[in-house]
Image: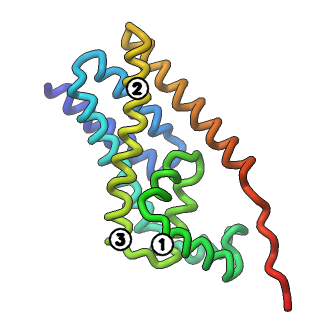
Amino acid sequence: MTATLGALAWLAVVVLFGAVVPVVPTGAAVSGAAALAAHQDPLVVLLVVLAGAIGAYLGDLAVYLALCWGGERIARRLRWLRGPQRLDRVSARVRESGVSLFLVSRLIPGGRLPVLLAAAVSGVTWRRFAVLNLPASLLWSALYAAIGVLGRAVFPEPWQSVIAAIVLVLLVSQVLGWWGRRRQVPVQPPATP
């Protein structure tokens, strides 16, 4: 049991690190851990979900606090947030969407940081962000753990299900990223009077 708790703690640290430094495939880590846990003890899958959610949540809080501190300077440098009308639109969307926007932003590659930046710049309070991000982190972790459990249902060997879960997560991430780029509508500059 001690080894399982240690592995879960490491999973939370990896996901936290990946939330702060977004080059770590955190979804694949949660899926792989869930696939492995489903082979050993299906009850541990719930702990994998919890560890992934804790890591994602704490990492998002750290990133959000950093963006609240320096987000205005970053926003002024980004082309997609220049201009008061664009920032107002993004800010209104963040305030209206709630949990769903944070969940979707975690699922789309490269979508989480812009949403966190927009939330920080738009004045979403730290407390509101903490409340909205909690269910989003939990749902995100549960979704990726389900992918791992699906790999366990298909493949008899633990190593096969872990590899299948990681490949599936990477494939889904690429498809979602491609789809998001195709759906982007070019923003028209505001008409001058």
Q: Give the colouring mode of the picture.
A: rainbow
Nearest to viewer (mark 1 / mark 3): 1
The residue lying at 74 percent from left, 47 percent from top is: 182
Cα–Cα span, label 2 and label 1: 33 Å
The total of numbered circles placed on residues is: 3
Q: Secondary structure at mark 2?
A: helix
Across and down, in percent, residue 134 comes to 33, 56
Which corner quadrant of the image does residue 157 belong to?
A: top left
Q: Residue furthest left?
A: 1
Dot 2 corresponds to which residue? 148
Q: Amino acid at mark 3?
A: Arg
Across and down, in percent, residue 36 comes to 33, 20
- Is 187 situated left or right of 47 in this image? right
CB within 8 Å, label 1 to label 3 = no
The C terminus - image quarter: bottom right
The label shown at residue 95 is 1
Dot 3 corresponds to which residue? 128
Nearest to viewer (mark 2 / mark 1): 1
The one of 40 and 14 positioned closer to us in this rendering: 40
The residue lying at 48 percent from left, 72 percent from top is: 95
Sort mark 2 into few (<14), some (14-19) or many (20+) by Cα contacts within 10 Å: many
Which badge, 1 or 3, is on the more N-terminal residue? Answer: 1
Q: Amino acid at mark 2?
A: Gly
Sort mark 3 into few (<14), some (14-19) or many (20+) by Cα contacts within 10 Å: few
Q: Secondary structure at mark 1?
A: helix
Which badge, 3 or 2, is on the more N-terminal residue? Answer: 3
Q: Amino acid at mark 1?
A: Arg
Compared with 110, 147 (above or below) is above
